[in-house]
């Protein structure tokens, strides 16, 4: 029986079968999707409206954007300066014609009409593509739920500012901004961008002060006077045209637009009629090219619709503003697809959007204000395809700086009077308390540092030493004055978590903490350079190179004149001395009062032996003890001779014990070998009877904390660490 077999072995291959089924399903979906799509436009003038219609008619013949069988139709209105009338016209002339998206420009006068279009269309989740509105308020997706734009908000100028500061190596600035949505957004983006570039501390920008002002100000002199006392001379300013004019006027009266100052401003401030010479500003490329933005927005919209129709079912767009109806899910999906689009070769450059629907990769011109208010481009912030990121191109030789200089200003003011801190550390810094007498010529007054400067009864100290001589020579050479003070807590500086710190954040103590928190200008002390400190402060060239030194007590000399007495204790020696004379006295008494002592004995040689006197008894007792021969003067009586034998036995034991102990002491008193370094086994072995410590918060303390292989040793040391090196040295001397 003949038949047709469908499967992997006969007929169509399995892959081809799947492709055919997928194509059939896709055609079924496309059959349900509309063939025509109305695109709305709220434009500023008739010329833009004409261009809008021409672009849509032209794109219908571009297969890469519009699939066959699909047609786009233009539906547009001219924007009314009145936002209420604009909202009504959107309902009557756009939503009533079932537009799938709206492209909105700005009115010729007024700024609120784009918001009216966003509110009205966003209620039905119809995507709105702005081509001119740059207010930061449109980035809030809780309010403008379906708004995105082909122009960046004003706050994105912070990205270019950060690149400019990096290029000129300006690491300390003063930020001036108006207290509106755009000003606060610009400050927030600048702080985020400048601190999240890299971990390298060299490119982190420090904002010394933030000056916020209410728009419409009459005078800015008071704020400028505060800025003049600050160290930074680089001013970043966001202000409207009128406010910028007032700020520039007052700054010029205070000579703050002359040599040494740097002004970097936003686009609105460049519109003022009194922008100082040397000011740097930004201008968005193609900012007013409405026709180019219309073309890019239509290309992005049609690309998103093409992707959406190939993947999803398209429901009909809302057609009535009279009833609320239900949420248009296709509008939500279309908005997400538009945000994912990237147009590499758009009329305005690379077109892409961030998570807020704002244009990214927008290009700027860096503008320099020259003589007679001429604004000239000296650089560009453009997209680099090779690096796949924005890139700053700047010609430094073309820049005219304030004061008509061609060389870049330093960007900060070096103060002539410095707050200098030091710490007691012999022999570099000697400190003594000055009670009533004054400091001598080679000494410098150095009270304990108090950040509040309110203490009137502070004890005065005088400092001298190598570091003080170095400070005096620096002051003469560089021509500055100074106020010297001692470390407030007596510490060099450690990076720890303090109890007063909110959120458990680490902060510096001691000298480093005062310098990091800008309560002091300079430290002149024997401060060791290590990676932790170098990350937060700048060091000079070291004046002394020295590694880690281990200090231990010097062993006492063993070869003293009385070292032969060491085998016995002092008490035993006294008792032996007493015993010698007591035995001698008893020998004398026994021999004197013995019956044999009343008469003289006849010797073989005919002589007679006298009785033992006291001196002979003492000589006998010492002779027996010291093992010397006794020639004469021996006891005659039996009892005395028995005592003499007992004393001789005692002397034998004493001498034998002394000899054994002396040999043992000579062996045990060999000098111990000195520690070879921090890798010595006796230091790392916590079982050894060896106590080690260092100075709290010192470079050595931080070194042991940093080294993982020394962690056990550090935990042992931590409980014994000292506040000052003087206390540690004193305890080492005491053993």
Image (cartoon, grey):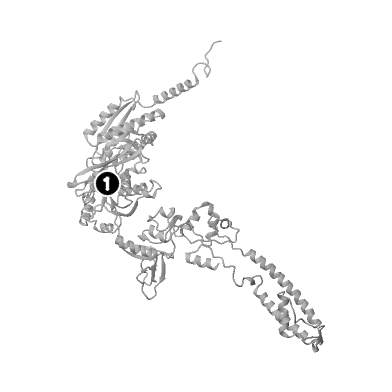
Q: In the picture, residue 649 is in which quadrant? A: bottom right
- Residue 99 visible, this angle: no
Residue 536 in the image: state x and y as whole percent: 40, 54
**Viewer-proximal residue, 235 or 698?**
698
Q: In this picture, is 26 found above or below 251?
A: above
- Residue 269 visible, this angle: yes
Residue 659 in the image: state x and y as whole percent: 69, 69
Q: In the picture, residue 452 is in which quadrant? A: bottom left
Report the quarter where the N terminus lies: top right
Q: In this picture, is 445 found above or below 409?
A: below
Total marks shown come to: 1
Q: In this picture, is 234 found above or below 41?
A: below
Extreme bottom residue here? 598
Residue positioned 56% across, 62% down in the render: 691
Extreme top residue here? 1
Q: Secondary structure at mark 1?
A: loop
Residue 456 in the image: state x and y as whole percent: 36, 71
Extreme front residue here? 605
**Viewer-proximal residue, 338 or 690?**
690
Residue 385 in the image: state x and y as whole percent: 34, 35
Residue 653 falls left or right of residue 141: right
Structural crowding at the residue carrying mark 1, measured as other residues with C-alpha within 10 Å and reported as few (<14), some (14–19) or many (≥20): many
**Viewer-proximal residue, 639 or 720?**
639
Task: List the residue tagged with mark 1.
Answer: 266
Residue 551 falls left or right of residue 179: right
């Amino acid at each position: 029986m003949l038949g047709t077999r469908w499967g992997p072995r006969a007929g169509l291959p399995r892959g081809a079968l799947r492709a055919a089924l997928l194509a059939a399903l896709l055609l079924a979906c496309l059959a349900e999707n509309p063939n025509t799509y109305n695109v709305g436009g709220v434009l500023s003038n008739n010329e833009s409206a004409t261009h809008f219609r021409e672009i849509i008619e032209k794109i219908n013949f571009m297969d890469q954007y519009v699939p066959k069988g699909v047609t786009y139709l233009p539906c547009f209105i001219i924007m009314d300066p009145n936002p209420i009338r604009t909202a009504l016209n959107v309902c009557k002339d756009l939503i009533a014609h079932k537009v799938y998206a709206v492209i909105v420009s700005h009115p010729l006068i007024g700024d609120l009409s784009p918001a009216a279009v966003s509110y009205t269309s966003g209620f039905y989740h119809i995507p709105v593509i702005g081509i001119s509105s740059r207010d930061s308020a449109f980035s809030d997706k809780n309010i403008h739920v379906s708004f995105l734009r082909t122009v960046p908000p004003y706050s994105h100028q912070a990205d270019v500012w950060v690149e400019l500061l990096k290029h000129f190596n300006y690491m300390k600035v003063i930020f001036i901004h108006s207290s509106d949505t755009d000003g606060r957004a610009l400050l927030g983006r600048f702080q985020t961008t400048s601190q999240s570039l890299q971990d390298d501390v060299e490119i982190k920008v420090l904002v010394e002060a933030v000056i916020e002002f209410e728009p419409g100000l009459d005078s800015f002199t008071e704020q400028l006077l505060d800025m003049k006392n600050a160290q930074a001379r680089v001013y970043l300013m966001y202000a409207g045209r009128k406010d910028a004019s007032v700020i520039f006027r007052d700054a010029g009266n205070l000579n703050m637009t002359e040599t040494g100052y740097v002004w970097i401003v936003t686009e609105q401030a460049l519109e003022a009629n009194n922008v100082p010479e040397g000011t740097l500003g930004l201008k968005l490329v193609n900012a007013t090219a409405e026709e180019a933005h219309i073309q890019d927005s239509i290309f992005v919209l049609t690309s998103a619709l093409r992707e959406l129709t190939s993947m999803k079912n398209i429901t009909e767009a809302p057609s009535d503003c009279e009833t609320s109806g239900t949420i248009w899910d296709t509008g939500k999906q279309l908005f997400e697809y538009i945000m994912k689009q990237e147009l590499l070769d758009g009329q305005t450059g690379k077109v892409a959007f961030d998570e807020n629907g704002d244009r990214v990769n927008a290009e700027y011109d860096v503008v320099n204000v020259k003589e007679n208010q001429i604004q000239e481009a000296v650089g560009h912030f453009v997209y680099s395809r090779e690096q796949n990121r924005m890139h700053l191109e700047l010609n430094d030789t073309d820049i005219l700086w304030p004061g008509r200089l061609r060389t870049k200003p330093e960007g900060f003011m070096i103060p002539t009077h410095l707050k200098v801190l030091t710490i007691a550390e012999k022999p570099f810094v000697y400190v003594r308390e000055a009670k009533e007498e004054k400091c001598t010529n080679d000494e410098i007054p150095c009270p304990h540092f108090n950040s509040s400067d309110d203490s009137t009864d502070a004890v005065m100290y005088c400092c001298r030493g190598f570091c003080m001589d170095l400070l005096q020579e620096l002051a003469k050479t560089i021509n500055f004055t100074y106020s010297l003070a001692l470390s407030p807590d007596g510490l060099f500086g450690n990076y720890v978590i303090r109890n007063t710190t909110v959120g458990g954040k680490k902060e510096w103590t001691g000298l480093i903490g005062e310098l990091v928190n800008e309560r002091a200008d300079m430290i002149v002390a024997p401060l060791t350079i290590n990676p932790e400190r170098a990350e937060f402060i700048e060091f000079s060239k070291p004046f002394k190179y020295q590694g880690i030194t281990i200090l231990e007590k010097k062993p006492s000399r063993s070869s003293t004149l009385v070292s032969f007495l060491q085998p016995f204790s002092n008490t035993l020696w006294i008792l032996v001395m007493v015993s010698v004379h007591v035995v001698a006295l008893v020998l004398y008494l026994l021999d004197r009062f013995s019956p044999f002592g009343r008469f003289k004995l006849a010797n073989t040689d005919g002589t007679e032996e006298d009785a033992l006197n006291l001196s002979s008894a003492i000589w006998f007792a010492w002779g027996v003890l010291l093992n010397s021969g006794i020639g004469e003067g021996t006891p005659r009586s039996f009892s005395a001779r028995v005592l003499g034998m007992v004393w001789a036995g005692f002397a034998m034991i004493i001498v034998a014990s002394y000899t054994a102990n002396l040999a043992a002491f000579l062996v045990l008193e060999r000098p111990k070998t000195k520690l070879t370094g921090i890798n010595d086994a006796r230091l790392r072995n916590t079982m050894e009877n060896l106590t080690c410590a260092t100075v709290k918060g010192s470079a050595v303390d931080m070194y042991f904390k940093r080294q993982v292989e020394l962690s056990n040793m550090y935990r042992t040391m931590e409980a014994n660490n000292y506040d000052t090196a003087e206390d540690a040295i004193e305890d080492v001397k005491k053993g």
